[in-house]
Each structure stands twice: as structure tokens, then as C-alpha cells.
Amino acid sequence: DAKTTQPTSMDCAEGRAANLPCNHSTISGNEYVYWYRQIHSQGPQYIIHGLKNNETNEMASLIITEDRKSSTLILPHATLRDTAVYYCVHYGGSQGNLIFGKGTKLSVKP
Amino acid sequence: EAQVTQNPRYLITVTGKKLTVTCSQNMNHEYMSWYRQDPGLGLRQIYYSMNVEVTDKGDVPEGYKVSRKEKRNFPLILESPSPNQTSLYFCASSRDRGNSNQPQHFGDGTRLSIL
């Protein structure tokens, strides 16, 4: 079962920053937190991942709290094409399977 | 371009008619995996492979087979498809499984309808 919880849905105005929270208080200290998004029924698209430190790449920034109990994905300038379901994800164990929760449906509005 | 390619993208077929969904990756990844996605159930792992000739069951393997004869290919075989296998299927790959500092890359999906 997923160890992550996210809001069911969020709205964001185009051009503004979208901040998507995730609680993962039961993830162990050596487990990375991953973020993926899924647009319609396309394949999940990898966005970013992190362990303890904040991370940034060309798509987004990831802020992880010092106690590692939660994180926030930041899309700095959301566009209409960023409308998708965003998943905060962790590995399930020795199978190497990713555990997806229910995700947050982000709607970017003009 | 690094990618995971699945074929076909869509398939409607009938109960009992054997089918194969192909998956190929061009990133020289050792680890490959199949998931199915169903409404309300999220993504569930069917089978995975840690390397050539090494495969193992995931969480929902019943009714499926896989093979890994080459590093780049990981086909999913439904020997006798049934309606409860109607689903959206994704293939994924990563450099390896052992280190969790490895993002998995997903294909675009295959939508199967078994009548």
C-alpha cells in the first residue's frame, strides 16, 4: 500500500507557481521520494526525485522537510500543458516496483 | 531519444485468443517491469525482470507470462485472455533495481479490451 497522501485536486492559474504537497511520514530514512505525472492515460512521466536535500531540474523543484515527513513539488510557472495527475511515489521493496497513491489532479486554468 | 516503446497501443480481442504486447527500451537498462492500471486500483506490478533470463512475479501475475531473452525486450504474453484482463498496461525500465536512486521510465501504454 502507498505510504503517501496527497490532496485529491488543486487548481492553479496559468503562469503562477503550482505547489503540490505530499505527506510521507512512514517512508524510511533511506527511501527516495519520486514525483511522476500522468496526462490523460499516457505513461507516467518522471519529474524529479530526492532523499534529504532539495532538488531542482528543468521541470520542477522538490522541497523536502528536514524530518522527511513531507515534501512539496513546485512547478514554477504552470502552463495549461501541466494539467495532469501528479503522483508522489516510493519504491515498494525488493521487487523494485513503484507504489503510486491516488495522486493530485492539478488543473491549470487560463 | 531515450524511450520505452510498447506495441500495440490499442487492441480489442476476444476471450481465449493468445496475444503478446511487446516492450522495447533503448537505454541499456537492466531492470524492466510490467504494470496494469485500473480505475480505483492504481498501478499494480505484474512481472519484473532484473536482467536477461531473470524474471519474477509481481503483485498480480495470474494469467500473464513474460520472457527476457534480450536486454532490450520484455514482452508480456496473455496465453488465454479473459475479460478481467481488460486494462491499461505500462512497461517500465530503469538502470537497475537494487539502488532506489533510479527513476523508472514508462512507455506510452497499451489499452487492451478483452470481449
Image (spheres, coloured by chain):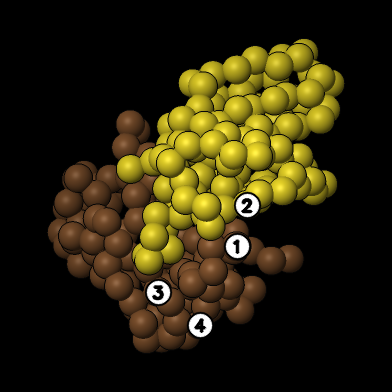
- Residue matched to label 4: B71
What amino acid type is highlighted by mark number 3? Ser
- Give the label on residue B101, or none: 1
Q: Is residue A42 visible?
A: no
What amino acid type is highlighted by mark number 1? Asn
Whole-number angstrom distance, CA of label 2 to CA of label 4: 29 Å
* Position of residue B19 measured from the top left corner of the image (x, y, whole percent): 29, 64
Chain B colour is brown
Q: Name the residue at 54% across, 36% down.
A: A69
- Pointer 3 and pointer 2 on the same chain: no
SS at mark 2 in the image = loop
Q: In this view, does B54 lie to the left or right of A27?
A: left
Residue B39 lies in quadrant: top left
Q: Which of marks 3 and 2 is in front?
A: 2
- Residue matched to label 2: A51
What amino acid type is highlighted by mark number 4? Lys
What amino acid type is highlighted by mark number 2? Leu
Chain that bears disc 2: A
Say if mark 1 contacts mark 3, CB within 8 Å.
Answer: no
Q: How crowded is mark 1: few (under 14 residues within 10 Å), some or many (20 or more)?
A: some
Among the chains pictured, the one given yellow colouring is: A
Say if mark 2 contacts mark 1, CB within 8 Å.
Answer: yes
Q: Which of marks 3 and 4 is in front?
A: 3
Q: In this view, does A39 lie to the left or right of A8?
A: right
* Position of residue B56 measured from the top left corner of the image (x, y, whole percent): 30, 73
Residue A84 vs residue B22, the one in the foreground: A84
Say if mark 3 contacts mark 2, CB within 8 Å.
Answer: no
- Pointer 1 and pointer 3 on the same chain: yes
- Residue matched to label 3: B49
Whole-number angstrom distance, CA of label 1 to CA of label 4: 21 Å
Q: Name the residue at 65% across, 32% down.
A: A72
Q: Name the residue at 59% across, 63% down.
A: B102
